[in-house]
Image (tube, helix red, strand yellow):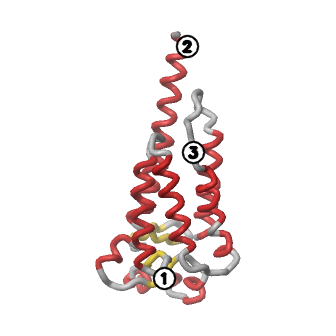
Amino acid sequence: MQIIALAVTFLAIVVIVAAPWQHRPLKITGMPLLIGAGAIQIPMLLDHRIAYAPAVGAGLVVIWAVANRQIPGARLLMFGAGLNVLAMLHSQGMMPLAPHMVASLPHLGAPALLAHSKDVIGTADVWQWIGDWMPLQLPSLTLVGSPGDLLIAAAVIYWACISRRLAIRQTALIRTA
């Protein structure tokens, strides 16, 4: 799961920096924050669980989104990552996994898998609803996400759609001028 998160972070940095369809570059600040958000996850890929690393990484994304709120979708990203930070801070810096998800997904219940992930088994309280509890069934894998993850995905999709539309509109304006 961390490999997916790291790959998405890297891809987002590349796409935001390169943005091949942008005629007018967006003023983007704080790129070291995104790089730090991805880099702080690397030890977890190497089976070294560091307390609060996922929360710090998500917090860096929130700070970056606040600094770049003029980018389409940045505010959704800010709220989604903010929800994830709240959930993680409530669970000692790791994302709480709803207890009912552990029981319903046998491969998640293996302590060896949870030992090297960003997830911890959460408690059955009100905080579980901002943690990981929504399953996404893929053909060979089941992922579990949170409401914050949905907002982050919506932000990326919104950014991709709006940025493309703005680029087309800018190109049309340039040609008519």
The image quarter containing residue 35 is: bottom right
Q: Which residue is mark 1?
A: 120
Q: Earlier in the sequence, mark 1 or mark 2?
A: 1
Name the residue type under label 3: Thr
Measure how far apart labels 3 and 2 are at the Cα level: 30 Å
**Residue 148: assigned label:** none
Residue under the point 64% across and 55% down: 10
Mark 3 neighbour density, 10 Å: few (under 14) some (14–19) many (20 or more)? few
Residue under the point 55% across and 16% down: 174
Mark 2 neighbour density, 10 Å: few (under 14) some (14–19) many (20 or more)? few
Query: In the displayed image of the protein, which residue is found farthest to the left?
Result: 126
In the image, is residue 38 above or below residue 155? Answer: below
- Horizontal relation, residue 60 to residue 36: left or right: left
Q: Earlier in the sequence, mark 1 or mark 3?
A: 3
Query: Of residues 162 and 26, which is closer to you in this image?
Result: 26
> Marks 3 and 2: which is nearer the front?
3
The image quarter containing residue 98 is: bottom left
Q: Which residue is mark 2?
A: 175
Query: Of residues 165 and 52, which is closer to you in this image?
Result: 52
Q: Which residue is mark 3?
A: 29
Measure how far apart labels 1 and 3 are at the Cα level: 33 Å
Name the residue type under label 2: Arg
Give the secondary structure at mark 2.
helix
Query: Of residues 149 and 40, which is closer to you in this image?
Result: 40
Q: Earlier in the sequence, mark 3 or mark 2?
A: 3
In the image, is residue 29 above or below residue 60? Answer: above
